Image (spheres, rainbow, N blue to C red):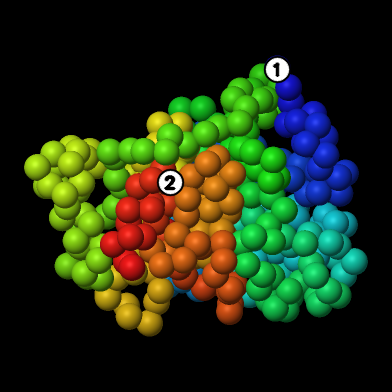
């Protein structure tokens, strides 16, 4: 079986970017180990602190963030990093070319109940000499990403990533500590009858989203003419992985709980990387009104409404928003 480094080389990834990706993997392998230890290492549970998002930080949020931050800011090819868990972007090397944004442990509310969580990462190229502790250098739309991926810490530890030439799936072989290629060229089925959304927010959605979900729930007799199933794991990485494997549509739409926020999910380290992966696998990813990867960010923690997955189903949701 092909190891990750061989696949990256075959895809024409240059040695500098390869080393940046390799460092992300070193950190993720350590995160996987620590997650596996859980209570044995006494690292479950929450800290006393809140992150910039206003969310209480789990111990493993902080541990995962520090593992990724420390190894990447020391990488000579990294200009800077941006993290869900860091208020500001952090400088790496002034002459580094790459910018890495990440959600170090997405879905961390699932940790204490032993459900799947993941690391999401996105890699951009600095377009000028701006230092990495100035967020301006990160504020590029999702189409500028040179690589994107996630590591899903589940029954097995999986890496799904793209460098713009399709989406590959790797499985961590714990005997040798390497990610090995286990599925090449993932393709999302164009149609689906399975939606993922947090239904408890229904009264806060815009009318268009309410109408779409109402129509789904009417099943065969409704305007969409088919019976839908529903899933909600409360871990975006797990939802996206399910969609990559068997199709589906995942939505975290705008809701009026906090009208000042465009949505719950963050553009730079959730929306954009997942959108690159989904589009590279033949799916679609929209705010409901425009492609997520066309959104111009104003800040490293910008939020965005998310509708992604099987392209024909995403097209339906976009049509409801016309
Ligand atoms: P809710 C996890 O906190 C996350 O950012 C995504 O991984 C997940 O899809 C969503 O939030 C879950 O949100 O409102 O269901 O807890």
- Quarter of the displayed picture in which ligand 1 can be seen: bottom left
Q: Secondary structure at mark 1?
A: loop
Measured as percent of width and height from the top left, residue 135 is found at 68, 76
Residue at image point 33% right, 44% down:
233
Measured as percent of width and height from the top left, residue 255 is found at 29, 70
Looking at the picture, tell me which residue is in the foreground, 26 or 66: 26
Q: Residue furthest left?
A: 221
Of mark 2 and mark 1, the one earlier in the sequence is 1
The answer to whether any part of residue 149 appears in the image is: yes
The answer to whether any part of residue 70 appears in the image is: no
**Residue 277 got which mark?**
none
- Tell me: residue 250, above or below residue 188: below
Q: Is mark 2 within 8 Å of ligand 1?
A: no
Q: Which residue bears the numbered disc 1?
A: 1
- Tell me: residue 191, above or below residue 83: above
Where is the C terminus found, in terms of image quarters?
bottom left
Residue at image point 70% right, 28% down:
178
**What distance separates the C-alpha of mark 2 from that of mark 1?**
31 Å
Measured as percent of width and height from the top left, residue 167 is found at 61, 37
Q: How many marks?
A: 2
Find out whether the residues at labels 2 and 1 contact each other: C-beta distance under 8 Å.
no
Q: Is mark 1 within 8 Å of ligand 1?
A: no
Q: Is 303 situated left or right of 120 in this image?
A: left
Looking at the picture, tell me which residue is in the foreground, 105 or 5: 5
- Splitting the image into 4 quarters, where does residue 258 fall? bottom left
Q: Which residue bears the numbered disc 2?
A: 311
- Tell me: residue 183, above or below residue 68: above
Q: Dot 1 surroundings within 10 Å: few (below 14), some, or many (20 or more)? A: few
């Amino acid at each position: 079986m092909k190891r990750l480094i061989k696949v990256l080389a075959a895809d024409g990834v240059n040695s500098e970017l390869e080393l940046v990706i390799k460092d992300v993997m070193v950190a993720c392998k350590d995160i996987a180990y620590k997650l596996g230890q859980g209570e044995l290492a006494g690292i479950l549970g929450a800290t006393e602190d809140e992150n910039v998002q206003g969310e209480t930080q789990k111990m493993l949020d902080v541990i995962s963030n520090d593992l990724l931050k420390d190894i990447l800011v020391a990488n000579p090819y990294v200009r800077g990093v941006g993290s869900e868990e860091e208020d500001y972007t952090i400088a790496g090397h002034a002459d580094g070319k790459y910018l890495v944004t990440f959600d170090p442990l997405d879905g961390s509310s699932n940790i204490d109940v032993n459900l799947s969580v993941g690391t999401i990462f996105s890699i951009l190229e600095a377009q000028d000499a701006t230092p990495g502790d100035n967020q301006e250098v990160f504020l590029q739309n999702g189409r500028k990403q040179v690589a994107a991926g996630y590591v899903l810490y589940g029954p097995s530890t999986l890496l799904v990533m793209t460098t713009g030439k399709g989406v590959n799936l790797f499985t961590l072989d714990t005997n040798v500590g390497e990610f090995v290629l286990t599925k090449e060229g993932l393709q999302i089925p164009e149609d689906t009858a399975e939606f993922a959304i947090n239904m408890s927010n229904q009264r806060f959605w815009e009318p268009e989203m309410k109408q779409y979900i109402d129509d789904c729930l009417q099943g065969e007799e409704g305007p969409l003419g088919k019976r839908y199933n529903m899933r909600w794991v409360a871990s975006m990485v797990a939802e996206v992985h399910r969609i990559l494997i068997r199709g589906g549509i995942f939505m975290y739409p705008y809701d009026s709980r906090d009208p000042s926020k465009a949505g719950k999910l963050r553009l730079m380290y959730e929306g954009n990387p997942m959108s690159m992966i989904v589009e590279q696998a033949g799916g679609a990813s929209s705010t409901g009104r425009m492609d997520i990867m066309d959104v111009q960010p104003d800040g490293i923690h910008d939020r965005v409404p998310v509708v992604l997955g099987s392209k024909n189903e995403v097209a339906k949701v976009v049509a409801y928003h016309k």
